[in-house]
């Protein structure tokens, strides 16, 4: 029996996935959570074989939760399942230790097959997204530039951003300037938008 943990902030999606997977004789949904913060505690409690994680959730996002699972419960294989098939998400999911990456418009048969294949030790990646990711290449942003842009999503002054990342205002300005240049944006807000659409944030 393949024990599965589901994590998605939309209750209807969680319910649909649970019902679909529950129809399979070799799959049992042992946990279902609505935020990234609940993933690790529930996984430690229920010891799933496979965790199916949405990317965008309250608290920790699915990529951060995947990295925690990989570190604390390495035998639990992770599939990232998202509405947003962004190439940058794929690269970050693989870096976080995920074994699979599928988009939510995959067929039920594809999702069930992905769970079985990942449980068997294989990697499963949406082929169109893999091709797009290879064509786009890796994120041009450094880790610090990504941190600064992520904080800049909510606006705030350079001083606010500097406090948030623990850097000087001059260093934050340099990171913002570099991120704007690398994304081809004209403004900080546009750089945030481009980075989000590419899956780099």
Image: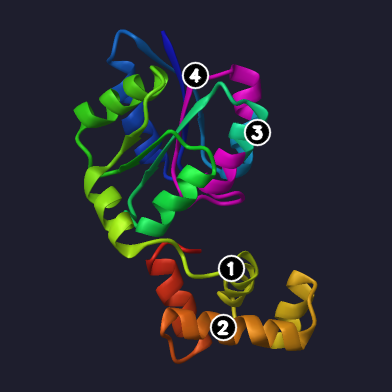
Q: Position of residue 42 (x, y in %)?
A: 61, 27
Q: Which residues are magenta?
A: 42-67
Marked residue nearer the N-terminal end (1 or 3): 3
Q: Is residue 45 magenta?
A: yes
What label does residue 178 carry, if any?
A: 2
Marked residue nearer the N-terminal end (1 or 2): 1
Q: Position of residue 184 (x, y in %)?
A: 41, 84
Asked whether residue 189 is in view, the answer is: no
Q: Residue at x 29, y 49 (%)?
A: 130
Q: Is residue 152 magenta?
A: no
Marks 3 and 2 close (CB-CB < 8 Å)? no
Marked residue nearer the N-terminal end (2 or 4): 4
Gap between marks 1 and 2, in whole Å? Answer: 9 Å
Q: Nearer the viewer, residue 94 or 149?
A: 94
Q: Residue at x 42, y 45 (%)?
A: 10
Gap between marks 3 and 2, in whole Å? Answer: 32 Å
Marked residue nearer the N-terminal end (4 or 3): 4
Q: Nearer the viewer, residue 199 or 48?
A: 199
Secondary-structure class at tag 1: loop
The residue to which callout 4 is attached is 49
Asked whether residue 84 is in view, the answer is: yes
| Residue 190, above or below 164 | below
**Outermost residue, bottom side:** 186
Relative to residue 160, is residue 137 drawn left or right? Answer: left
Q: Nearer the viewer, mark 2 or mark 4?
A: 2
Q: Position of residue 93 (x, y in %)?
A: 47, 46
Q: Nearer the viewer, mark 3 or mark 2?
A: 2
Secondary-structure class at tag 4: loop
The residue to which callout 3 is attached is 71
Q: Residue at x 33, y 19 (%)?
A: 116
Marks 1 and 2 close (CB-CB < 8 Å)? yes
């Amino acid at each position: 029996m393949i024990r599965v943990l589901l994590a998605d902030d939309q209750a209807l999606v969680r319910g649909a996935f649970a019902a679909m997977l529950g129809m399979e004789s070799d799959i049992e949904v042992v946990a279902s959570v609505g935020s990234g913060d609940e993933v690790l505690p529930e996984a430690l409690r229920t010891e799933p074989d496979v965790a199916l994680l949405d990317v965008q959730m309250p608290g920790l996002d699915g990529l951060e939760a995947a990295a925690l699972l990989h570190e604390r419960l390495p035998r639990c294989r992770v599939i990232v399942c998202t509405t947003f098939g962004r190439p940058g998400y794929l690269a970050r999911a693989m870096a976080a230790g995920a074994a699979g990456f599928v988009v939510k418009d995959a067929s039920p048969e594809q999702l069930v097959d992905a769970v079985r294949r990942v449980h068997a030790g294989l990697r499963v990646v949406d082929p169109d997204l893999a091709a797009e990711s290879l064509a786009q290449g890796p994120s041009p942003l450094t880790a610090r530039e990504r941190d600064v842009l992520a904080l800049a999503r909510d606006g705030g002054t350079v001083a606010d951003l500097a406090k948030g990342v623990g850097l000087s205002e001059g260093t934050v300005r340099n990171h913002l300037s570099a991120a704007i240049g690398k994304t081809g944006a004209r403004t900080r807000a546009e750089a945030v938008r481009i980075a989000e659409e590419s899956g780099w944030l």
